[in-house]
Image (cartoon, rainbow, N blue to C red):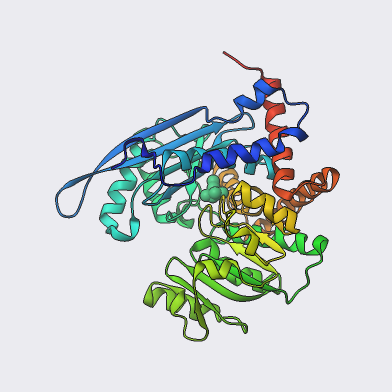
Amino acid sequence: MEVGGMCEHKVSLFENVIKQMEVARPYLPNVEDDLFEVLKYPKETLIMHLSVRMDDGKVKVFSAYRSHHNNALGPYKGGVRYHPQVTLDDVMALSVLMTWKCAVVGLPYGGGKGGIACNPKEMSQGELERLSRAYALAVSRFVGVDYDIPAPDVNTNPQIMAWFLDTYEKVKGWSEPGVYTGKPMVLGGSEGRKDATSRGGAYVTREAMKVFGIKEGATCAIQGFGNVGSFAHKLYKELLGLKVIAVSDIGGGVYNPNGFDHDKLLKVLNETGTVANYPDGDKISNEELLELNVDILVPAAIENVITEENAPRIKAKLISELANGPVTPEADKILFDKGVICLPDILTNAGGVTVSYFEWIQNRTGHYWPIQKIYEELDRMMTNAFLAVYEVHRKYNIDMRTAAYVLAIGKVAEATKVRGIWP
Ligand code: GLU
């Protein structure tokens, strides 16, 4: 076990996020240096070591985290990821990204993030439940409906949110469904939360295709086939009319210029554990998928997959970032110089937290919305966010990520400043 979770061999995601902020710095002349410094660091982080009784009778210790970055615009908000390599550095960085993401879309939230270093694929349901409840108990004084509202992220799902919520409510002794979002429908989950990240990404990509001149029928490759990647395969085809010619997951990928049948992909994934075993097509690696000659590339897996090493070989015209942090700052520069448009994570994948926000509103009012209203509101918010970022991009002739950072940091800085630094 790595105490504190610091892991030296990985690229620091936190350092990358700080670098991205620094790139936006010159376009924020009204933000004082000392205030800018304040905005870099999480306000507070909780490091936990959770003891869980495993099925073999032994007790295992798991490192776990929750980071609160900034709450000037509202309560901390962000998912909890379960991943063997998750570190404090990742969770801190991801909490910073959540602050900017919520600000870009205009949600009344700040940024938070959580994680447990574990491999859920090697755990039984009972072990997962005990681990999840241990986490929820440990963070019960660190979350709250007006304080910090966690949600799903990589490898977490509505069932895990149900265990989190149940533990929280049993500790507190009252009902508080809005403290966790991404819940099962029966516990107050929202219509449309499952595919919200991919749908929001599709709306943003649709607007980008209009202004950057990419037409229906354009080709697309998707890296990652978890919740986000699989819905992207469905929705980028259905809503954008794209031709998805390659998909992949951790087990490898498959290429077919004629595309894939969605249900068959899911079946192959369920039966064999990877989409790479899809029978009609050529096997390709994740690395090859990223470098394919496609119009639109959709990284929908994990961070740091497009780096200075492979960026020169990227052939896509547009990158639609559904993962958090898939492109490093060094790669960003190379892509911009090559004329590749990168739609940044803090804009493109904000649909998930936006529908979480709808869920939170519904829980608090007790009035539940029909799916059509979710789609309409999500479309309106994502389209407005895209147009706002696009305007900054045009104004300063900067890449879309830097434009999104300028917008978000400007907003959070203003809120932080008007509140004043106290105590
Ligand atoms: N984990 C998602 C994200 O990174 C959703 C967070 C939420 O719904 O609060 O945006």
Among the 4 quarters of the image, the one containing residue 372: bottom right
Q: Residue furthest bottom?
A: 280
**Residue 179 visible in the picture:** no
Please name the residue shown 15% across and 48% down the image: 58
**Residue positioned most to the left:** 57
Residue at image point 60% right, 45% down? 357
Q: Residue at x 44, y 49 (%)?
A: 81
Q: Is residue 406 above or below residue 119?
A: above
Please say if 65 is above or below 154: above
Please tell me in which quadrant of the rendered image residue 88 appears: top left
Which residue is found at the position 49% from the left and 42% from the top? Answer: 12
Q: Where does the image place residue 303, in percent across and percent down from the top left? A: 52, 52
Closer-to-camera residue (260/41) = 41
x and y percentages locating residue 179 in the rendered image: 48, 40
Does residue 35 show up?
A: yes
Front residue of 305 and 264:
305
Q: How many dots with numbers?
A: 0
Residue 400 in the image: state x and y as whole percent. Answer: 73, 50
Q: Quadrant of the C terminus?
A: top right
Q: Is residue 245 left or right of residue 85?
A: right
Q: Give x and y (percent) for residue 33.
A: 68, 23
Left or right placement of residue 5 versus residue 198 in this view: left
The N terminus lies in which quarter of the figure? Answer: top left
- In the rendered view, would you say 299 is above or below 8? below
Residue lying farthest to the top in this orientation: 423
